[in-house]
Image: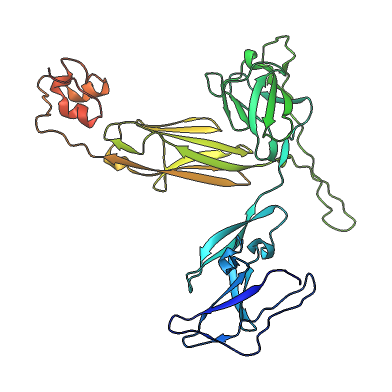
Amino acid sequence: MSTSESVECVGINLNGAPLALPQPEPQVAASEGGTATLRCLFHGNPPPKIAWKFGELTQECEALDCPYGVDRFMQDGCLRCVCREDPCIRANCQPTERCEAFAIRNPVSQEPEHSAKCVYDPVRTPAGIAGDENAAVTGELGQPLQVRCLAYGYPPPAVFWYRGYDGTMVPYHDAVYEAIGNVLLIRSLAIETLGEYTCQAYNGEGKAASWVVFVRAYMPEGVFIENELLVPRNTLPPRIRTQPPTSAGTTTTTTSTTTEAPRPLFTVPVSAHVSTPFSALNIGADLRLTCEIDGFPEPDVYWTKDGASIQPDARISITGSTIVSRLLVSRVTVADSGVYACHASNTYSSQSDTAQINVQQLTIPAKCMDDPFFANCDLIVRSKFCTHQYYGKFCCKSCVEAGQPTLKKK
């Protein structure tokens, strides 16, 4: 090592001047790329603090640019510093994972350190659709029909539906259609809804993928209409199964008409998500819960409250389809508070989601009373006449308990 500048070692002692030990090393030689060790030989009591200078620059350990911290150690009486290695070097993440380094604090020394974790991160791929060319889906006229677009890719692609190949976009939600995720629901199959549909999937990688499917219907019995999208109803013959011989030398053939359900070529994991506009309701209000469902084959759906199955009655109704289920509880009471759950399952997977609902007790003013002499308050509430200028003022208590506003007195 050759340099035209001098290197100086300085010892500092607050209580007295430090003393240099004999045999100093005024010059150190080392080959290029090698290691040069400089010794600073001072002593004193208390031990002096040591700092190094190169020209006018003081090189401290903290001056190192080390994103994951510095390790300090003594070597040959000198303080040495090295940068800590990237914690991801020893993480052993899988090919479909990426490593993330994060800061932690050592529980013993309370010094900042870094650790690493493996995060699932598959390779980004353009969207694709697993579907046959000239695919067709057939349903019953007047019945709902579900068309599924098996889109894939990473990130998961968004799916859009169109009438025809270059036609108009299908609405997400109206009286005829409901599109949730990669499923298009035709609420009631009609002649006008038959024809060609296009599913388009895009995730920002490469080009969008498209898939065309023809929606058809079975020909109604006793009706003959010339329409290529109305197909005759064909029933598959029962599957013939042959049993093995019962004994040697005797062959017995038995036919069975048992039809085995074929396993679907594709399956989609079941998912369920419950949403509600309000989690806290007043007595007498209506509770509305919506559960968005996905999965293939089509999952079965049911509702529970505090673990008990919910059955429709005069106050409770359950409507919807295989991709969305709606629960309505009319005129809730305090007893309707609890945990509501939507459960969806098929042969291959299942999932549920919950919502906590609290029904609050109303505080009724002392002057808010019913006067049954002038009005039948139960009838007034059922008929929603609480805002009537005559009937409402005689049924204040019943109207407030039912969550129906009453006219304010002028």
Q: Is residue 342 above or below residue 193?
A: below
Q: Nearer the viewer, residue 69 or 88?
A: 69
Residue pictured at 66% horizontal, 72% vertical: 6
Q: In which image quadrant can residue 167 be found?
A: top right
Identity of the residue drawn at 63% across and 22% down? 140
Query: In the image, is residue 269 above or below residue 226?
Result: below
Figure check: 297 above or below 142 = below
Could you say where residue 126 lies in the image, as x and y percent from the top left? 73, 37
In the image, taking residue 34 as reference, residue 332 lies left or right, namely left
| Foreground residue among 35 and 23 | 23
Residue 371 in the figure: left or right of residue 289: left
Q: Nearer the viewer, residue 121 or 344?
A: 121
User: Quadrant of residue 170 in the image?
Assistant: top right
Residue sitting at x 29%, y 42%? 335
Residue at the bottom extreme of this rendering: 22
Observer-nearest residue: 34 or 18? 18
Q: In which quadrant of the rendered image does the N terminus lie? A: bottom right
